Image: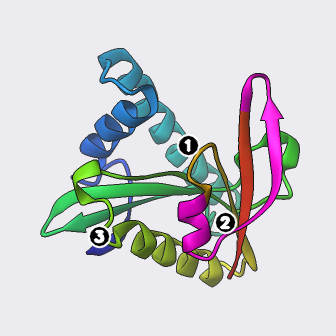
């Protein structure tokens, strides 16, 4: 399995957006797909603009994909934050997903490990995430639960991993 960071111009970006849309909305809807795609592109472009203005490299957000023999098998994002009220929890692993037919083969662990290496190179000491129902999986790959969070009707577990 290979892990790489991608931009909106990467050949797998369209497939990533389609799979992400299907995963988030549990169905493929073309308008939701376009909305999600443009949101990712806007985030990427904003980071590039800020990079040019500040004359320094802006590290986040980043999109990572996992491929096996050139085929997209999973993806995740490394973002500055996932809960605006908890901005100190940074950086964050977000939208981690492995396509169902590739699960239970170690690809998720490898993708997380590779993203953690990037976060460590960026001089972070910890990485965070939120999960509604995958706490056991993340615990099995060295994450620790430290809080729960409820916002509106959504409830999830906050987790961290030392780098």
* Label 1 SS: helix
In the displayed structure, does residue 85 sit left or right of residue 49?
right
In the displayed structure, does residue 64 sit left or right of residue 153?
left
Seen at 76% across and 43% down, the residue is: 83
* Label 3 SS: loop
Which segment is the magenta one? Answer: 136-154
Seen at 38% across and 27% down, the residue is: 26
The answer, for residue 12, to whether it is visible in the render is no
Residue picked out by circle 3: 105
Residue picked out by circle 1: 43
Residue picked out by circle 2: 55
* Label 2 SS: loop
Residue 56 lies, in percent from the top left, at 66, 69
Do the CB atoms of the residues marked 3 and 2 lie less than 8 Å apart? Answer: no
Q: Work out whether 107 lies above or below 120.
A: above
**How is the structure coloured here?**
rainbow
> Based on the displayed image, in which of its 4 quarters is residue 80 positioned?
bottom right
The quadrant of the image that shows the N terminus is bottom left
Q: Work out whether 24 lies above or below 12.
A: above
Categorize mark 2 by other alpha carbons within 10 Å: few (<14), some (14-19), many (20+): few
Residue 85 lies, in percent from the top left, at 87, 41
Q: CA distance from mark 3 to mark 1?
A: 31 Å
Categorize mark 3 by other alpha carbons within 10 Å: few (<14), some (14-19), many (20+): few
- Residue 151 inside the magenta-drawn segment: yes
Tell me the mark number nearer the camera, choosing from 3 and 2: 3
Categorize mark 1 by other alpha carbons within 10 Å: few (<14), some (14-19), many (20+): some
- Identify the mark nearer the N-term, 3 or 1: 1
């Amino acid at each position: 399995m290979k892990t790489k960071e991608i931009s909106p111009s990467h050949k797998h970006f369209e497939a990533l957006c389609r799979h992400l849309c299907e995963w988030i909305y549990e169905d493929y809807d073309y308008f939701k797909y376009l909305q999600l795609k443009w949101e990712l592109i806007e985030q990427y472009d904003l980071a590039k603009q800020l990079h040019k203005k500040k004359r320094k490299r802006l590290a986040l957000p980043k999109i990572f994909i996992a491929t096996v023999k050139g085929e997209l098998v999973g993806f995740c994002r490394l973002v500055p934050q996932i809960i605006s009220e908890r901005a100190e929890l940074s950086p964050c692993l977000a939208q981690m997903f492995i396509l169902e037919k590739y699960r239970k083969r170690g690809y998720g662990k490898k993708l997380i490990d590779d993203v953690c290496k990037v976060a460590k190179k960026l001089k972070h000491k910890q990485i965070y995430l939120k999960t509604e129902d995958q706490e056991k999986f993340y615990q099995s790959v060295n994450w620790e639960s430290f809080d729960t969070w409820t916002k509106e009707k959504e409830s999830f577990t906050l987790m961290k991993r030392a780098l």
